[in-house]
Image: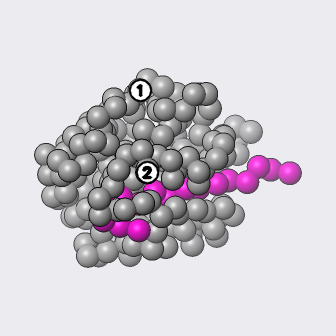
Amino acid sequence: MAAKHRLFIVHGYLAGPHFHWFNSVKTQAEALGMEVVVPAMPTPTKPEPNAWLKTLEHAVGQVDAHTYFVGHSLGGLTLLQYLSQQKVTTCVAGAILVASFDEPLHTLPQLDAFSASPLDHSKLQKTIPRCAVITSLNDQIVPPEYSLRLSQNLNATLHGLPNAGHFLESDGFSELPLITEFLEAFIADVEACA
């Protein structure tokens, strides 16, 4: 029997499991046969790195070659910190980072604690063999140059949209089919390599 593909969607600052496009991606991923978890990160209006990392660790359990991640904004940095701090270097199936960053943001200095521990980019490149970064060229919250540097640091595919803001529901994003396209490609590649 084939291993079950598991997807964890990690929301960001000021958000929750049912915000923006998360429900749509969850439904589409379940239609692909994935088991999907969208953990509620604690105190999203005043996030604290250790609490977010513990919540993600509890939700994920053991990562393996059939574990996928989608992170939005601060959720992307959180999942990268989580994977960077794992004792065992186990490859995950893939990660999709939407409007994400890996350094202090001049727009949100209250989140600097999340980037205080430097990421092990070399380890992450090995741990995440399939990685995509999605950015918007008019994102005022996480300007695109942050996502560009993140994609370079991870040696990840970069996909830029011209006018998507921060991919919030208020920007017109209650769904984001590009994520499903990446998931389908990642699943096909994982299954071809099995």
Q: Residues within 10 Å of mark 2 (few under 14, many from 20)?
A: many
For residue 105, above or below residue 85: below
Give whichever of discs 2 and 1 has the lower sequence position.
Answer: 2
The residue depicted at 35 percent of the width and 62 percent of the height is 44
**Residue 143 appears left or right of 1:** left
Locate the C terminus by quadrant: top right
Badge 2 marks a residue whose secondary structure is helix
Q: How is the image coloured?
A: one colour
Q: Nearer the viewer, residue 125 or 178?
A: 125
Amino acid under label 1?
Asp
Which range is magenta? 1-16
Q: Given this view, does label 2 or label 1 mark the residue nearer the observer?
A: 2
Q: Looking at the image, can residue 186 be seen?
A: no
Q: Looking at the image, can residue 40 be seen?
A: yes
Name the mark on residue 120.
Answer: 1
Amino acid under label 2?
Trp
Badge 1 marks a residue whose secondary structure is loop
Residue 150 coordinates in the image, percent (x, y) = 31, 38
The residue depicted at 50 percent of the width and 58 percent of the height is 9
The residue depicted at 23 percent of the width and 43 percent of the height is 112
